Image (spheres, rainbow, N blue to C red):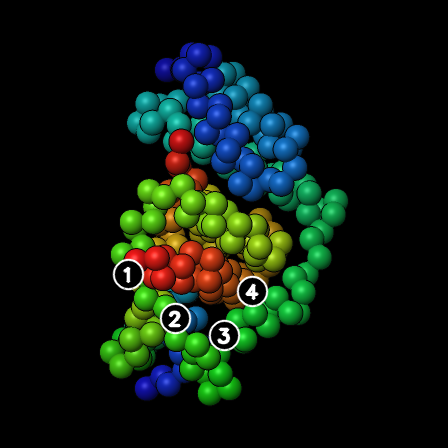
Amino acid sequence: MSASAADIDIHRPYLLRYARLHLANPAQAEDVVQETLLTALEGGERFSGRSSLRTWLTGILKHKIIDQIRRSRREQPLADDDQSEADAVDALFAADGHWREAPGDWGNPESALDNGRFWQAFELCLQRLPARTAEVFRMREVMELSTEDICKALDISTTNCWVMLHRARLVLRECLQITWFDDAAKNK
Amino acid sequence: MMASCKKASQLLSQGQDRRLGPLERLRLAAHLAICDRCRRVGRQIEFLRLAVQRFRDRD
């Protein structure tokens, strides 16, 4: 079973957005999407019809993105995140390990998902994550790779992976608290 | 007993990435039972996962 070029091309905008979540360089994002569409058309990997076409295409795209990330890292390794970034988690806690500031009540945060302005805040907060931390977080949450696969792809230890994911989540939480949920509480 | 919210937040985060061991789960549950701040953060961390997926899939 093969999918037609027209069927496949419908998914191009989605694939491009997906690729750009991982690859800051727009030309690289274009390239991996182009390669994905070619691979799909050539039927090098067959569409079984068991999953949706978009899921199948995304599966091919993921491999292309991981290859690209690995190539980029070989050519130009990302600098380690600043120590100040690494300390960002420590800054959230008092010396005895308790929250320095009580995390705010987000009420029913799902209601923010329909608000366009929330997504602007969300995107800004994602962009503010330190580069390496962000890379691991996106591979885990956007690509939904296991930590084992991330460690293999980036050649880092599992512990390091967990530390970065913990940091990403707490820093992102804090950013959303400040830029969105504090205001949302005020405006109620 | 685990007194540290920092440690609890580590387990809350790792719980998203691996199956916690029996002892870890016990310690985390004991902490969450007495710490509404960490309960809150636990829910918020779950929300982050949902939000990223929506962010990825929105058309």
Callout 2: residue from which chain? A
**For numbered disc 2, what is the local secondary structure?**
loop
SS for tag 4?
helix
Q: Are the residues tagged 1 and 4 within 8 Å (C-beta)?
A: no
Subunit that carries the residue with mark 3: A
Query: What type is the residue that disc 3 sits on?
Result: Leu
**Tag 1, which secondary structure?**
loop
Chain of residue at mark 4: A
Q: Say whether marks 3 and 2 touch (CB < 8 Å).
A: no
- Which residue sits furthest right? A75
Task: State whether discs 3 and 2 lie on one chain.
Answer: yes
* Numbered circle sitting on residue A107: 1
Q: In the picture, which quadrant includes the N terminus of chain A?
A: top left
* Residue A160: assigned label: 4
Evaluate if marks 4 and 2 touch, with contact meaning CB atoms under 8 Å apart: no
Residue B41 location (% of width, % of height): 36, 67
Residue at mark 3: A92
Q: Which of marks 4 and 3 is in front?
A: 3
- The reply to whether dot 3 and dot 1 touch (C-beta < 8 Å) is no
Q: Which of marks 4 and 3 is nearer the N terminus?
A: 3
What amino acid is labelled 2 in the image? Pro
Question: Of A24 and A31, which appears nearest the observer?
Answer: A24
Q: Is residue A75 visible?
A: yes
Residue A105, percent from left and from top = 32, 66
Q: Which residue is drawn at 56% across and 65% down?
A: A160
Few, some or many C-alpha atoms within 10 Å of disc 3 (few <14, some 14-19, many ≥20)? some
- Given contact means CB atoms under 8 Å apart, are the residues at marks 1 and 2 in contact? no
Residue type pointed to by label 4: Asn
Q: Can residue A149 be seen in this view?
A: no
Crowding at mark 1 (Cα within 10 Å: few <14, some 14-19, many 20+): few
